[in-house]
Image: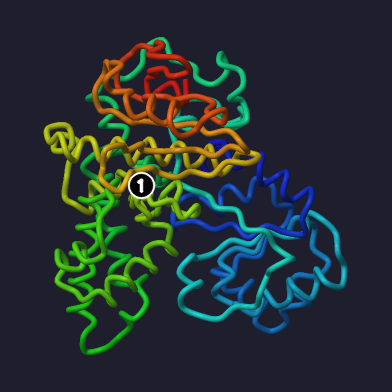
Amino acid sequence: MRPYLPRIVDSVLRSDLSAFAGVLMTGARGVGKTRTALELANSVLRLDQANDRSLVEADPIGAISGRETPLLIDEWQIVPEVLRAVKLDVDSRPGPGRFIVTGSARNDLLSDVWPTTGRLIRLRLRGLVGRERFGSAAKASLFDRWDDPDERFAIPPDPPNLRRYIEIVTDSGFPEALTVSSGRQRRRWLRAYGEEIAHSDMPGLAASPGRRKDSKRFAVYLESCALNTAGIVSQMDLSRQAGVNARTSAGYDEALDSLGVVDSLPAWGSNRRNRLYTERAKRHFADPGLAAAVAGLTSDDVYAESDIRGRMIDTFVTAQLQVEADAADSARLFHLRTRRGEHEIDVVAEAGRRLIAFEIKAGGAPSRGDARHLIWFRDRIAGDRFAGGVILHTGPHRYEIDDRIEAVPIAGLWG
């Protein structure tokens, strides 16, 4: 087994196990759920292995009883009845740190399962981010250390240039893909991942006369989503590009969200019924490397095309911030756009009462003009809740742009 690469979520998992009976780890296939869970598990039932599977099928309650805890139940969806056994065990013998349950996200769409509400707390694992690959995963979340300006960001002595950032972006965050040293082979792995989604993971594509046709249409839809990553795209536009009706594309969206392939960043202000802001979500591929591969783009292609370069960098940075928010004591991420498009902010974080705004730029030397939306947000919208504004960019320097607004290299998120 390869040495374990510590994850930011490790401390959250430990904390959850100290307080709750168990944790149900969710996330896209291949992000490392099993490997992460094995670091804390003291016994394991792997339902993808014949002996463990037959034991659980024959006696689910007996199979999980008397084992050293935490017990990892891996690939639970193969024998869904195991969740009922977990429910009964937790109800009869309450106490923290009993179970870690991992498995396929697609089962949320394909079958009814025993409810785990009040027994297992959900914890999402995402792909590897820069702080896990190049920095220290053990540090507290960015949002939990925000009050110390010196601790927020740490600029590495030799930060990447734009070309290197694009290479990192297109590497992907799937641990297995990153073990492949060749960029060509890594793209093949990622393309195969996308094809597997189209042919095996999508509900409603099981053997039927229309399967091949549906798979091809879905592949077109997936590519359209990849090319429009970091965009606010209407359902109608995506449907038209893929040649499917609105009902079909809505089903595709639901599946991609449940599979952890696409993330929707909700609009800030929409829950306040404020007519100033758009209510449409901003959609990102969860992994920019997968987005590039699905769209047939190499790192050179991404580097050369300004629109796709900006989208991929936006997608990459938003993924970093999502992981930081997941690990924070209290943080939620949104995007902001006024209805007429006069103002737009890539990410607004609500960390408790504080509001922190982020702009993401593919350029390397942002100016005060690039901060105009952050200044507007500070002066006109956030009021005393404003805790800072940041332009994350591809240059080497961190510097102040305006009161409580600064420019920070993207690598400052992991340095």
- Taking the image as shown, residue 391 lies to the left or right of residue 222, namely right
Residue at 81%, 55% (x, y): give it: 96
Residue 250 drawn at (x, y percent): 32, 71
Residue 157 in picture, x, y percent from top left: 41, 10
Apparent side of residue 162 relative to residue 95 in the rendered image (left or right): left
Q: Is mark 1 on a helix, strand or loop?
A: loop
| Residue lying at 54% horizontally and 69% vertically, measured from the top left | 48
In the image, farthest residue toward the bottom? 209
- Asked if residue 384 is positioned above or below residue 232 in the image, the reply reads above
The picture quadrant where one finds residue 95 is: bottom right
Where 187 sits versus 381, above or below? below
Viewport quadrant of the N terminus: top right
Q: x, y (%) of residue 320?
A: 44, 37
Disc 1 residue type? Asp
Residue drawn at (67%, 77%) of the image: 56
Specify the quadrant of the image occupied by residue 301.
Answer: top left
Which residue is more in the foreground, 119 or 98?
A: 119
Colour scheme of this structure image? Answer: rainbow
Q: Where is residue 22 in the image (x, y as percent from the top left)?
A: 72, 59
From the viewer's perspective, is residue 338 above or below residue 155?
below
Which residue: 29% across, 35% down?
313
Residue at the disc numbered 1: 287
